[in-house]
Amino acid sequence: MNYRKFIPKKILTLLILSGLFFLFNFLLNWYMPKSLALDVKFAYSAKVAYESLTEMGLEGRSRYLLGIWALDFPYMFIYLALLSGIIKKVWRSERVLILPFLLFAFDVLENFIVTLMLVNFPDRYTFLGCMASIATTSKWLFALLYVLVVFWGLAKNKKRPVAADELQ
C-alpha cells in the first residue's frame, strides 16, 4: 500500500513529528522532577531556583541533569521542526519562522544555564539563577506568542480555500 496516495508527504511528516512530540512530552513528564524542574516555572527568583534544586536532592539533581541532556535537547529539535512546519503551513510564509527559532534559542540557553547551576551545586550564583529565569520566562512568552500567531493565521485563512499544491 502506498501511503502517499492517501497522506501527502508534508502532512505525514507533521504527523510523525506530532507523535514524537507527544512521546517526548510523556517521557519528560515521567522522568523529570515535575514540580521542581525550572523548565516549567515562570518568572522565578534565583532564590526559588536554588530552593528547587536543593529540594530535589542529589539523586533528583542527577536525574534532572540527565533528563536535560538525554530527553530535553532531542525534544527541542523535534518541537522546532514541528512548530516550524505548523506555522509555515498556517501562514504559507517563511517570515514567521523566527518564532519557533526564538523559542528554541531561549530553551537551549535555559538548559545550558540550568546545567551550570546543577554542575556547580551547592555553590549558588545569583546571576545564573536570574539568567535561568529570564531564559525560561522568555521561552514561555515566545510559546504564548507562537500560539497566538498560529490562531491568528488560522482565523485569517479560514475563508481562503487551500490549493492542491499546498498539501504536497
Image: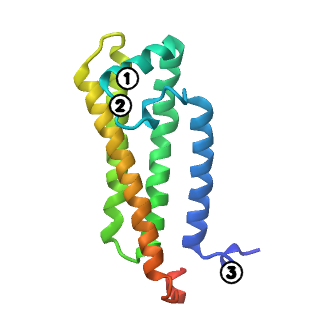
Q: Which residue is mark 1?
A: 48
Crowd around label 2: few <14 · some 14–19 · many ≥20 (10 Å)? some
Q: CA distance from mark 1 to mark 3?
A: 54 Å
* Residue found at x 54% / y 71%: 10
Q: Which circle's residue, 1 or 3, is located before the other in the chain?
A: 3
Of residues 11 and 38, the one nearer the viewer is 38
Contact, CB < 8 Å: mark 2 with mark 1? Answer: yes
Crowd around label 1: few <14 · some 14–19 · many ≥20 (10 Å)? some
* Residue found at x 46% / y 69%: 151
The N terminus lies in quadrant: bottom right
The C terminus lies in quadrant: bottom right
Of residues 166 and 137, the one nearer the viewer is 137
Q: Specify whether 77 is left or right of 20.
A: left
Q: Which residue is mark 2?
A: 44
Q: Which circle's residue, 3 or 2, is located before the other in the chain?
A: 3
Disc 1 on helix, strand or loop?
Answer: helix
* Residue found at x 54% / y 88%: 164
Q: Which residue is mark 3?
A: 5
In percent of width and height, residue 91 lies at 41, 75
Q: CA distance from mark 2 to mark 1?
A: 6 Å
Disc 2 on helix, strand or loop?
Answer: loop
* Residue found at x 45% / y 40%: 73
Crowd around label 3: few <14 · some 14–19 · many ≥20 (10 Å)? few
In percent of width and height, residue 6 lies at 69, 78
Contact, CB < 8 Å: mark 1 with mark 3? Answer: no
